[in-house]
Amino acid sequence: MKKIEAMIRPERLNVVKADLVKAGIVGMTVSDVRGYGRQRGQAANYRGASYAIEFRGKLRLEVFVREEQVEEVKRVIVQAAQTGNIGDGKMFISPVNQVIRVRTGETGPEAF
């Protein structure tokens, strides 16, 4: 199993979710997060006053998939989340060593 963690623009969530559901992904976790990447925030003006926005609002999308689903899910997330502008996000893929279903105590593929 793999954990796919994607930092995406909040306004792209509905498109990403719909496309993942079409691809057969049945569960995901979404969290509000703030951070910055290469752009290191940005300057903004409000009523004549200049201020810095150091952290941008993003969503962290976590999806756990079987090994054979990884390439499809990567493709779906990139296509659905991409706007072509700076700040589209990042994706991280990590191995998952063990899964346990808390309710039943099942482990491994049965718990997924």
Image (tube, grey):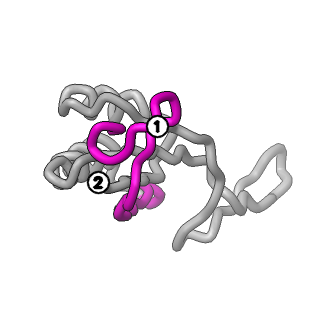
Name the residue furthest front.
105
Residue 105 disc label: 1
Q: Where, quadrant-wise, is the N terminus in this rendering?
A: bottom left
Residue type marked 1 = Gly
Q: Looking at the picture, how far across and down is residue 29, in whole percent?
A: 48, 37
Total label count? 2
Query: What residue is drawn where x is 62% and y is 42%?
Result: 32
Q: Where, quadrant-wise, is the C terminus in this rendering?
A: top left
Q: Name the residue under label 2.
A: 1
Q: Is residue 90 left or right of residue 68?
A: right
Q: Nearer the viewer, residue 29 or 9?
A: 29
- Which residues are drawn in magenta? 86-112
Is the residue 26 above or below the residue 100 in the image?
A: above
Q: Is mark 1 on a helix, strand or loop?
A: loop
Residue type marked 2 = Met
Label 2 packing within 10 angstroms: few (<14), some (14-19), many (20+): some
Query: What residue is drawn where x is 39% and y is 38%?
Result: 106
Q: In which quarter of the view is residue 101 placed?
A: top left
Q: Which of 72 and 9 is in front in this view?
A: 72
Q: Distance between the residues labelled 2 and 1?
A: 18 Å
Does residue 96 show up magenta in the picture? yes
Query: What residue is drawn where x is 34% and y is 36%?
Result: 16
Query: What residue is drawn where x is 47% and y is 57%?
Result: 87
Q: Looking at the picture, how far across and down is residue 62, in whole percent?
A: 44, 46
Mark 2 or mark 1, which has the lower sequence index? 2
